[in-house]
Amino acid sequence: MEQYERKVTKIGNSFGITLPTDLLKQVGLAQGDDVQVEVVEGKIVLRKKEQLTLPEGVDAEFMDILNDVIKEHDQAFKGLVDK
């Protein structure tokens, strides 16, 4: 596995890390792609966000609201699974 060393850089009020083009090609990422970022066991994990095609008649804004509600009540939903 090839390893890369990068520096954390200040970008406006945030911080960022640049990624080499060859690394992005290996994982199928390009400029403008969305990524998901999470912390797993103290490590930062980046994943290319999967683009889902919504069924006809399903509004993207509705799906965003539904996703927010699910995140907000995640523990309650998980509790219902056990019943």
Image (cartoon, helix red, strand yellow):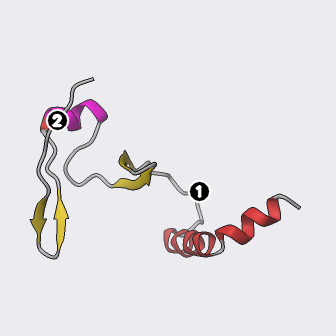
Badge 2 element: loop
Classify mark 2: residues with Cα within 10 Å, few (<14), some (14-19) or many (20+). Answer: few
For mark 1, give the secondary structure.
loop
Q: Is residue 50 above or below residue 65?
A: above
Position of residue 26 measured from the top left corner of the image (x, y, whole percent): 26, 30
Is residue 19 shown left or right of residue 26?
Answer: left
In front: 55, or 41?
A: 41
| Tag 1 residue | 55
Measuring 37% from the left and 55% from the top, which residue is drawn there? 37
Q: Quadrant of the N terminus?
A: top left
Residue displayed at 78% across by 65% down: 79
In this rendering, the answer to whether 26 lies above or below 13 is above
Residue 58 picture location, percent across and down: 59, 66
Quick check: 1 left or right of 13? right
Q: Position of residue 34 (x, y in %)?
A: 32, 55
In this figure, which residue is indicated by the disc labeled 2? Answer: 4
